[in-house]
Image (tube, rainbow, N blue to C red):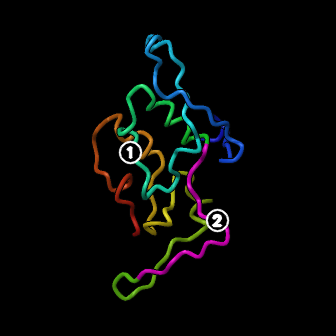
Amino acid sequence: MKKFFPVLSRDKATSSVNLEASETQHPSESIKVVDYELLETDPGIRPPISSYHPDIQNEVRKAYLKIDRHKPPYNFVYPWSVQGNQRRRFCKNWFDLYDWIDYSESKDLAFCLPCFLFKNVCKYGGDHFVTEGFGD
């Protein structure tokens, strides 16, 4: 994804807002730019793409691709969970192995970034990798 969309950090991302069309302009003539600072990066609490107005959904997708996937700070300690008689937790090196993975600190679950971005395009499949997250 990085070769198609350069990654922007949140502080360097230009933030311009013109999300709604002016009443004097035709909607297709207005330029719609998404404010990077208003986008929620934690996959456990961000709204689905389909909740945005249809005219800006593609711009929201592009903005999320430019921001890149959500990773906790380097010194973040991933919590342990118990499944059966085993203790498990998220491994940092999965970010290096899987370029699609997102992690939510709020839910302690992993999410699929491409599934989040393009889920509503085909309307098939469940929400397990988009809204519920996975921990196994």
Q: Where is residue 2 in the image (x, y as percent from the top left)?
A: 64, 41
| Label 1 packing within 10 angstroms: few (<14), some (14-19), many (20+) | some
Q: In which quarter of the image is the N terminus?
A: top right
User: Which disc, if any, is residue 31?
Assistant: none
Query: Which residue is at the front of the view, 8 or 15?
Result: 15
The amino acid type found where label 1 is placed reads: Pro
Inspect the magenta stretch and tell me whether residue 70 lies in it: yes
Q: Looking at the image, which residue is at 36% across and 54% down?
A: 131
Q: Is the magenta stretch mostly helix, strand or loop?
A: loop
Left or right? Give the position of 97 relative to 9. Answer: left
Left or right? Give the position of 48 relative to 123. Answer: right
Q: Please identify the quarter of the rendering in which residue 71 is found.
A: bottom right
Q: Please identify the quarter of the rendering in which residue 57 is found.
A: top left
Q: Looking at the image, which residue is at 33% across and 56% down?
A: 128
Q: What element carries label 1?
A: loop
The mark that comes first in sequence, 1 or 2, is 1
- Distance, label 1 to label 2, CA atoms, is 24 Å
The residue lying furthest to the right in this view is: 12
| Label 2 packing within 10 angstroms: few (<14), some (14-19), many (20+) | few
Look at the image and give the residue range highlighted in magenta: 67-81
Residue holding disc 1: 48
Query: Which residue is at the front of the view, 130 or 107?
Result: 107
User: Which disc, if any, is residue 73?
Assistant: 2
Q: What element carries label 2?
A: loop
Left or right? Give the position of 83 relative to 18. Answer: left
Inspect the magenta stretch and tell me whether residue 75 lies in it: yes
